[in-house]
Each structure stands twice: as structure tokens, then as C-alpha cells.
Image (cartoon, rainbow, N blue to C red):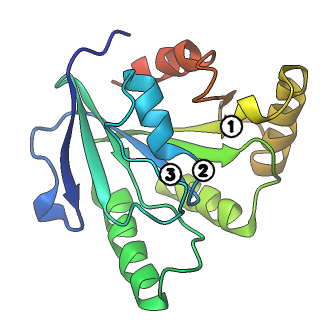
Amino acid sequence: MVIKDPKFEISAVSPKQYPTNNLPEIVLVGKSNVGKSSFINTMINRKKLARTSSEPGKTRQINFYNIDNSFYFVDLPGYGYSKMSKKEQVQVGKFIEQYLFNRNQISLIIFLVDIRHSPTDNDKLMYNYIISSGLPCLILTNKADKIAITKVDNAVTNLHKQLNPIGDIPILPFSSERKIYKEDVFNFIEQYI
């Protein structure tokens, strides 16, 4: 897929701020600092359209990126960031829940996990949340460049067994650094847009 004119459209915290053009939405979920913004930048071949930070918890709104007026990448705030106040966590949780359970334009959820670590309790909670939404899902094991390329397949298999033991949800490796898995991910996304 060749992306020609991606643009950031809006940050939203309530449905009245969501885009109204009915384009399919590919939603990114994962814990803080798992690489959702880097994923967007890699997929659209831009360095800084989605703001990245080494400090977790930067995304606190739902960010909509319009990809060539064909679909949106929707970046949800990361979870598990302890420096966010309890009040902020509750607020963010509410607007994420409202979005995930009421937005008809969601075509696919991409759930990013770190390939180097076993899923956390928060990852398992989010996984169960996604399953209960009934929406199509892809699990991406991100940061595949951080381990030896010969260990990627085993790490993906282990994470699949831990998160989705019945194996009914597809799982793919990903690396924003290496970009070698980008085509596989786009081939998957194209089925939903």
C-alpha cells in the first residue's frame, strides 16, 4: 500500500469530536510506551506525524490520523502508566470505553504488546476487553528489532500461547526500526478497509 497524503485530523475526548465521514477506523491499543505512535509513523512512511516520546503516558486523548481519505489510524491512550492521577485514569478509561463500545466505524483493533516481555495483568485485561467488544483483532508483537531475528518466531509463538491459547486471533511480529514486517501488516489491514 502506498500512502500519499496522511494527516493528523483531531484529538478527541468525546463522540461529538469524532470525525463524521464514516471512514473505516483501525484502532491501536497497548500499554504506554509500547510503540503505537512509532507504528503509525512506520506504516505511513513519515518520521513525525504521530508524536513519539520516550516518556510514557503522552497520549491522553483519542488521536485520529486520516490516511489518504481511505481510513483512519486511531491511537488510543496507553494504559498502565502510573504517573497519571487516579482521576485522570478514570476519565481516560471512560472515554476509551465509550469509543470502543459505541463507535460503528471501528473495522479492526490492533493490540500491540512488547515482544520481549510476557503479557502484564493490564495486557490480559485489555485483551479480555477487546474480546468482549466482539471486534476483529490483530495482535502485534512490537519491538521485534530488540531481540535476535532467530528468536522472533519463538517469541511470537510464546506470546500467542499466553494471550490467545485457542489461537483464533492472528498474531504478527513488528518492528518500527527494521520495517521488515510492514507489508505483512498492511496486507492484513487491507482486508478490513
Picture quadrant of residue 139: top right
At a point 55% along the width and 45% down the height, the residue shown is 35
Residue 29 image label: 3
Which residue is tagged 1? 143
Picture quadrant of residue 83: bottom right
Camera-side residue of 11 and 47: 47
Camera-side residue of 75 and 7: 7
Q: Mark 2 or mark 3: which is in front? A: 2
State the image coordinates of residue 149 (x, y, percent, origin top left): 83, 21
Looking at the rendered image, the quarter that the C terminus falls into is: top left
- Residue type marked 1: Lys
Residue 52 lies left or right of residue 164; in this view the side is: left
Q: Are the residues at dot 2 and dot 3 in contact (C-beta closer than 8 Å)?
A: no
Label 1 – label 2 distance at C-alpha: 8 Å
Q: Residues within 10 Å of mark 2 (few under 14, many from 20)?
A: many
- Residue type marked 2: Val
Is residue 104 visible in the rendered image? The answer is no
Which residue is tagged 2? 34
- Residue type marked 3: Val
